[in-house]
Image: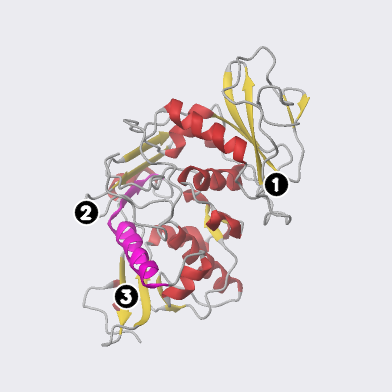
Amino acid sequence: MSRRPLPGSERARLDPFVIATGDASPRDQRDLMERPFFSLAKSRRTIPIRYAAGDVQVEVLAVPEHGMATIWDADVLIWAASQIVEAENYGLNTSRFLRFMPYQLLTATGRGTGIRAYDLLKGALDRLQSTSIRTTIRHGQHWRQHRFSWINEWELLTRQDGRVEGMEFVLPEWFYRGVIDRTLVLAIDPAYFRLKGGLERWLYRVARKHAGHQPDGWRFDFAHLHRKSGSLARPSDFALQLRRLILRQPLPGYRLLRLICEGRELLHITPVTMTGASCGKAVKGICTSHAPAICTSHAGPSVHRTHGSQLSLWPDNANPPRNLYNPKESNIAGAHGAVDNRSFGADFAPESWTGGEPDGGDE
């Protein structure tokens, strides 16, 4: 099926990891789950992401031709990580060089399998390959000398009649090492792939990493989340979107609560099967006017009004393994980051790369 790789190609010296069925429980790489490595916008983003918090620094650069890799494009990496972990669990040899049928990736991530889906997948791979990353994470003090892309190279293999025979791509060493280290991988809910908004997808990954199945969940200052997201939205618009998510409750396995404590607006994320306490009061609901609330004593009026019952999107089954790892950098009092927030772009677009390519509008 594979043609001979060109001289100098990594595929010429790596043994291929051939995906047999593509069936694997979805897993995500911890380092990618909370920090701003991807654009949350459907629109093409070329403005860099520069983030700093304590000893963690992240820099993401994009080229105008393709734009920055998006959080929907990151599904390719989640799928790849899932295949690698599944194979390693069975004692099989893996490699950074993956060979598979595009159909396997598309169906596993909830995409269509028509011609347009294949074209959109190729667009996602172009963005993943052209996006450039530098980070201190697992690179140490010499991080500025290490630049990588999410995919080093890729190729769609076709017959002379145009029929697709397969696809190949090579992952960067940084990502691969972060996947074969079991302590750096977490299982995620398959319902994640059905989340349509960029912010809710990013927020689920934050919830899965920090809240896990801890009874008390995890709290974040709204402003801290804004910095961690890398969003181009203004802080006030970002906060509005968080409040809307609190009303919709879209995250599988997690409940979102808005708290007002000591003048700060906080997001409290808890596992849906757990109950927690905050500010000495039982958790009963979100902070909406005329509704049971928490941490609202002496607080200003909410921007929301009481709504009727919301359609629950929470699955009946519990999330995968407990996550009891919470680095200090995730705390609401964590170190400060820096991102460029010039305007409110399309950070909350409802479509993934199967529903249409990112539009080319200015951010």
Label 1 CA crowd tier, 10 Å (few <14, some 14–19, many 20+): many
Q: Farthest residue toward the front?
A: 308
Residue 187 appears in the picture as rendered = no
Amino acid, disc 3: Leu
Could you say which is closer to the camera, residue 362 or residue 323? Answer: 362
Instruction: Say whether residue 287 is left or right of residue 43.
Output: right
Looking at the image, residue 269 lies above or below residue 180: above
Q: Magenta segment range?
A: 114-136
- CB atoms of marks 3 and 2 within 8 Å: no
| Secondary structure state at the residue bearing disc 1 | loop
Label 3 CA crowd tier, 10 Å (few <14, some 14–19, many 20+): some
Give the percent coordinates (x, y) of residue 173: 39, 62
User: Which numbered dot is residue 178?
Assistant: none
Residue at image coords 44%, 29%: 237
- Marks 1 and 2, how far apart in space? 42 Å
Q: Nearer the viewer, mark 1 or mark 3?
A: 3
| Secondary structure state at the residue bearing disc 3 | strand
Amino acid, disc 1: His
Hey, which quadrant is residue 270 in on the image?
top right
Residue at image coords 39%, 28%: 234
Amino acid, disc 2: Glu
Q: Nearer the viewer, mark 1 or mark 2?
A: 2
Main SS of the magenta part reads helix
From the image, tell me which residue sits under label 3. 156
Hey, which quadrant is residue 319 in on the image?
bottom right
From the image, tell me which residue sits under label 2. 65
Instruction: Say whether residue 54 is left or right of residue 87.
Output: left
Answer whether residue 129 is magenta in the image.
yes
From the image, tell me which residue sits under label 1. 213
- Marks 3 and 2, how far apart in space? 20 Å
